[in-house]
Image (spheres, rainbow, N blue to C red):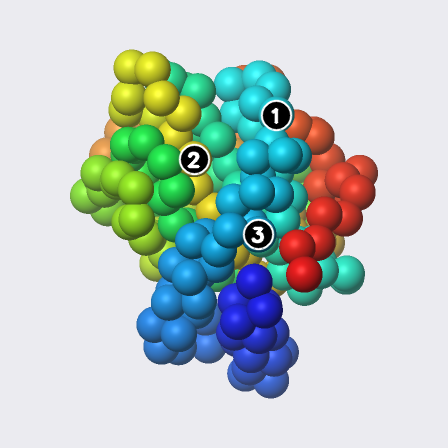
Amino acid sequence: MHKLLKEVVKVYTQFQKLGPSYLDTFDNRAITEATFEAVKTKQLQEYIKKEFKPIGDISMLPIHLEPEHRFTIAMFALKSGVKMPLHDHPNMFVLSHVMNGIGERESWDIDPIDHHQQIEFRKNKGDSRILKAIQYPKLQLKEGDNCYTTPNKCNLHKFSNSHDSELFMFLDVILPHYNGVDRVINFYQPISENQLELMGNPKTYQRHPIDVDDIREFIVQ
């Protein structure tokens, strides 16, 4: 984990200096390699085996929660047939590394013409609204695969488990993390190939525990 944390801190430091646009353009090969190495370590595998308890359709196990929402490393698991709701990552980078099973990722971006509606909704919530959007080809994922989310590419995504019995498990490296201020999660429902409904937190979205701020810090040294 030390190498991965070092790479994450490096990227986060540059993000602080250069802003969200850096997360769209930086060379992600080093952080990808460090993630691949981290999931193979005996220490992390034993930690997951000891601490992970699938609860609900979608479960989350924190690996590293950095103070002040700087970044988070966590493992997610989806039961067979489960689809995670479509959600966004405002001004964030996410590396998702598949650890077990097979699944599918759907990804979208909001048309720039409707970016202001996202910002307004984060501040005021209120009624749902229809936004113009761009949909990308679906990705079929298996163990060892990676996919990426950046501020301006595939910023909205959802994962689903394609296997009829196995868990679909993936490690997410998220930086910076949601902070409840300018990085607030929004959820969406596809209406057509170029339209999404922006809405509140769907009841179908289950995590354990529910709120990141309530999670005790699991830190793998």
| Position of residue 156 measured from the top left corner of the image (x, y, whole percent) | 42, 45
Which element carries disc 2, helix, strand or loop? strand
Q: CA distance from mark 2 to mark 1?
A: 12 Å
Q: Residue at x 80, y 38 (%)?
A: 214
Q: Which residue is mark 2?
A: 169
Q: CA distance from mark 2 to mark 3?
A: 18 Å
Near-viewer residue (26 or 209):
209
Q: N-terminal of the two: label 2 or label 1?
A: 1
| Position of residue 74 measured from the top left corner of the image (x, y, whole percent) | 57, 46
| Position of residue 185 measured from the top left corner of the image (x, y, whole percent) | 59, 43
The image quarter in which residue 175 lies: bottom right
Q: Nearer the viewer, mark 3 or mark 1?
A: 3
Give the numbered dot on residue 171: none
Residue sitting at the far bottom? 17
Horizontal placement of 206 versus 148: left or right? right
Q: Quadrant of the N terminus?
A: bottom right
Amino acid carrying label 2: it is Met
Pointers 2 and 3 in contact (C-beta within 8 Å)? no
Near-viewer residue (158 or 50):
50
Pointers 3 and 1 in contact (C-beta within 8 Å)? no
Q: Is residue 18 above or below residue 169?
A: below
Amino acid carrying label 1: it is Lys
Give the numbered dot on residue 43: 3
Q: Residue at x 72, y 47 (%)?
A: 218
**Circle 2: is it few (<14), some (14-19), or many (20+) Cα within 10 Å?**
many
Q: Which residue is mark 1?
A: 53
Q: Is residue 114 above or below residue 192?
A: below
Q: Residue at x 34, y 72 (%)?
A: 29
Horizontal placement of 85 versus 125: left or right? left
Amino acid carrying label 3: it is Gln
Q: N-terminal of the two: label 2 or label 3?
A: 3
